[in-house]
Image (cartoon, grey):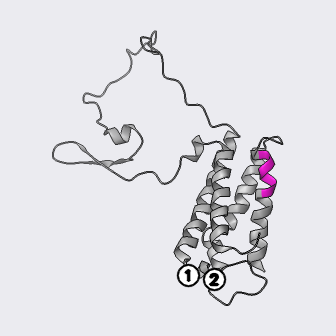
Amino acid sequence: MERMMGMSAMRDVMRDLAPMMQGQVPFDGITVQEAAAVLQSHAGDQMLALFPEEPIPASSFAKPELWQKWDRFAALSAELKLYSEGLAVAAANGLEAPVPMAAPEAGTDSMAGMDHSTMKMATEPEKFSVAELMGVSKRAAAATGQSGELAVASDLPAGPQFAAMAADDVFERISQTCASCHSQFRNGN
C-alpha cells in the first residue's frame, strides 16, 4: 500500500507540474521546489525499500523483471533522486536557463580607469591547470612537492550543472527517467 501511495504521489506531482513546464500556467518556483521535495522523498533508496523481493500481488503493476534486473532499477531510482534534487535547484531559473555573462569585446578594457596602485601582488603568481581553469577538476589542498607545483585533484563534477539549467529541462529528464522505468518494470498504463 505504501508503494502504491508513493507512486501515486509522484504521478500527481508530475501531472500538476506539466502545464507549468509547458508554459500553459504561470511558473511558480516555490511550487516546483515543493514538488521536487515530493519526488525526492520517493526516489533513491526510499523507492528501493518499497520493492522487497516477494511474490507480486495481483493488484501490483510491478513486473518480475524488476527483481531480475535490480541493478538497472536501482540506477533509474538513483537517477530520479538526482534529477529531483536538480529540479529543486533549477526552480530558481524558471523556464529559461540563465544567460552567462558576456565577455568584454576585443579591444576594450573593462578594468580601464580603475586605480590598482594599492593592490598587493604576489611575487609568484599561483599556477592553475587547464582543468582547474575550466572547472573540470577541483583545486587540491595546498600540498606542494619538491618542484613547488601544487598537486591537482582530477575528480570530475558529478552530473549536470542544474544551477545553469531551466527547470523544464530538468523536468523533461525526470519524465524520461520515469518513462524508461515504466517501460521496463511496470505493467499497464
Q: Is residue 33 above or below residue 110?
A: below
How dense is the environment of label 2, judged by Cα within 10 Å: few (below 14), some, or many (20 and up)? some
Q: Considering the image in quadrants, where does the C terminus appear?
A: bottom right
Q: Which mark is residue 97?
A: none
| Residue at image location 75% in from the left, 64% down from the top | 10
The residue where tag 1 is placed is: 68
**Residue 94, horizontal then vertical, whole percent:** 71, 40
Q: Does the stretch in magenta take in 148?
A: no
Residue 84 seen from this side: no
**Residue 91, horizontal then vertical, whole percent:** 69, 46
Q: Are marks 1 and 2 in contact (CB under 8 Å)?
A: yes
The residue where tag 2 is placed is: 64
Return the residue nearer the eye: 37 or 20. 20
**Residue 75, horizontal then vertical, whole percent:** 54, 68
Residue type (three-letter) at the residue carrying disc 1 = Gln
Extreme residue toward the top, this view: 113
Mark 2: which secondary structure? loop
Image-based side of 176 in relation to 9, left or right = left
Q: Quadrant of residue 77?
A: bottom right
Residue type (three-letter) at the residue carrying disc 2 = Pro
**Residue 144, horizontal then vertical, whole percent:** 23, 47
Residue 120 seen from this side: yes
Image-based side of 67 in relation to 16, left or right = left
* Cα gap from disc 1 to disc 2, whole angstroms: 7 Å
Return the residue nearer the eye: 76 or 179. 179
Q: Considering the image in quadrants, where does the N terminus appear?
A: bottom right
Return the residue nearer the eye: 50 or 133. 50
